[in-house]
Image: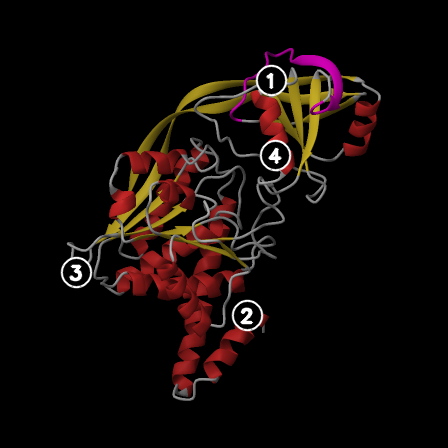
């Protein structure tokens, strides 16, 4: 028996007023929930690469509508027009080594011949600046890259995936300036040849960067739904999760989508007092493109909603430290009380009043109320984030059960 399952049973056994039959039912409910979550995440992971505006992204939207329908919730597809980045050629060549790469989706690009020049660290006088980036986008090195891009400090740049990741595969950076590209071409590469690359930089060797892309008109889709409450005069509650990503993203995105569906199932089965709005947004990796459209079409909803429950990234990842974020103390009190009853505690809490991570930042910026769950991930934005190895199913099921109880409480008047 896993630690989390054993922990759950210990909690139940400490409640003497529950009959053996009720204890069995509680445990069976958790097992059933874990099985449903496993089904959702495995299907999501197996669909393929979930980049915004691709065929996989569109198919995922239709699949999610079908999944909602299974729980008696009617979802719909809300189209979003964009110009998708199509990579034509992307490579980095130095000292006889040629590597495939992925350009940033918010920079300028080269032609088919690329850019050739001397290699050196970002901040040097080299034509092609190189930097290795740690997983946390809040790191000083990410800020250094951003500053170099905005200052056009090099003719081109190389962003190397950190050594904490597997030697094969690229951990891709989100495109925060997708609508207004910034700076010279930046190519992201794996850390496979990092030692040789350092030697080439030290010797000021010449390299060539090719980052040839075009923008292609595309349609992506948000998925939205509504469960009507008994008292429509009450402010609605919104449950949101991003559903697009750079790769298959089993633990990064799959947990949020599975919890999204579980909350829809539980709220549909327990008619809420207030209306419940659901939105699963595309465009996450492109500076929250889908959520921005959703909010633009509902300009008063940020402040009109009683609370936004944000089901963010990575809380389903194996080895994740769960982070909770709250707009104010009321929602922290509700969460702590319900989590305490299940012997759950977050690993970290974003201080109230500090701008939160993920889509919760949009709600914070608009002055709305929110409760948010996310985590960290040793495979964040990496192609090895796959079902089943990257996912901690038992922990995901426990936190989903807890958030179901929280959502049911907050759905009441």
Going 24% across and 52% down the picture, which residue do you hit? 236
* Mark whose residue sits in front, 3 or 4: 4
Instruction: Return the disc, 3 or 4, that comes first in the chain's sequence.
Output: 4
Q: Quadrant of the C terminus?
A: bottom left
Secondary structure state at the residue bearing disc 4: helix
Residue 247: name its quadrant.
top right
Q: Is residue 145 magenta?
A: no
State yes or no: discs 4 and 1 in contact (Cβ < 8 Å). Answer: no
Q: Is residue 100 left or right of residue 213?
A: right
Report the disc number at residue 152. Answer: 1
Give 34 or 252, whichever is nearer the viewer.
Answer: 252
Which residue is identified by label 3? 230
Instruction: Return the disc, 1 or 2, that comes first in the chain's sequence.
Output: 2
Instruction: Return the disc, 4 or 1, that comes first in the chain's sequence.
Output: 4
Q: Main secondary structure of the magenta part?
A: loop
Going 58% across and 35% down the picture, which residue do you hit? 172
Report the disc number at residue 270. Answer: none
Q: Is residue 111 magenta?
A: yes
Report the disc number at residue 142. Answer: 4
Q: How far across and down, in percent of the image, does residue 138 sit?
A: 58, 40
Q: How far across and down, in percent of the image, does residue 304 sit?
A: 24, 47
Q: What is the C-alpha distance between the residues marked 3 and 4? A: 48 Å
State yes or no: discs 3 and 4 in contact (Cβ < 8 Å). Answer: no
State yes or no: discs 4 and 2 in contact (Cβ < 8 Å). Answer: no
Q: What is the C-alpha distance between the residues marked 1 and 2? A: 50 Å
Which residue is identified by label 2? 4
Q: Which residues are magenta?
A: 105-123
Secondary structure state at the residue bearing disc 1: loop
Q: How packed is label 1: few (under 14 Cα within 10 Å), some, or many (20 or more)?
A: some
């Amino acid at each position: 028996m896993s630690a989390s399952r054993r922990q759950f049973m210990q909690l139940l056994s400490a409640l003497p007023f529950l009959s053996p039959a009720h204890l069995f039912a509680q445990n069976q409910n958790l097992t059933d929930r874990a099985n449903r979550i496993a089904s959702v995440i495995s299907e999501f992971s197996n669909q393929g690469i979930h980049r915004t505006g691709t065929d996989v992204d569109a198919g995922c939207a239709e699949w999610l509508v079908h999944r909602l329908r299974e729980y008696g919730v009617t979802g719909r597809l809300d189209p979003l027009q964009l110009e998708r980045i199509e990579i034509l050629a992307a490579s980095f060549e130095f000292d006889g080594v040629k590597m495939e790469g992925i350009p940033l989706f918010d920079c300028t690009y080269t032609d088919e011949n690329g850019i050739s020049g001397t290699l050196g660290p970002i901040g040097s006088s080299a034509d092609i600046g190189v930097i290795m980036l740690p997983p946390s986008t809040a790191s000083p090195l990410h800020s250094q890259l951003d500053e170099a891009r905005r200052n056009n400090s090099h003719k081109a740049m190389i962003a190397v995936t950190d050594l904490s990741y597997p030697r094969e595969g690229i951990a891709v950076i989100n495109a925060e300036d997708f609508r207004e590209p910034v700076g010279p071409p930046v190519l992201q590469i794996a850390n496979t040849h990092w030692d040789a690359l350092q030697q080439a930089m030290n010797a000021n060797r010449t390299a060539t960067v090719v980052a040839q892309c075009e923008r292609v008109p595309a349609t992506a889709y948000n998925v939205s739904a509504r469960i009507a409450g008994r008292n429509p005069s009450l402010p609605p509650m919104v449950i949101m999760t991003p559903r697009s990503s750079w790769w298959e993203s089993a633990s990064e995105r799959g947990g949020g989508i599975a919890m999204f569906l579980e909350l829809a199932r539980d709220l549909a089965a327990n008619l809420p007092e207030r209306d419940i709005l659901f939105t699963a947004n595309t465009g996450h990796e492109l500076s929250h493109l889908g959520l921005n459209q959703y909010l633009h079409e509902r300009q008063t909803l940020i402040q009109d909603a009683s609370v936004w429950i944000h089901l963010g990234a990575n809380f389903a990842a194996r080895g994740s430290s769960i982070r909770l974020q709250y707009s104010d103390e009321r929602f922290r009190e509700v969460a702590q009380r319900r989590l305490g009853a299940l012997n759950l505690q977050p690993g970290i809490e974003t201080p109230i009043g500090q701008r939160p991570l993920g889509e919760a930042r949009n709600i914070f910026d608009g002055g709305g109320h929110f409760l948010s769950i996310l985590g960290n991930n040793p495979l964040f934005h990496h192609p090895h984030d796959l079902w089943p190895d990257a996912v901690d199913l038992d922990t995901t099921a426990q936190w989903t059960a807890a958030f179901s109880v929280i959502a049911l409480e907050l759905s009441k008047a």
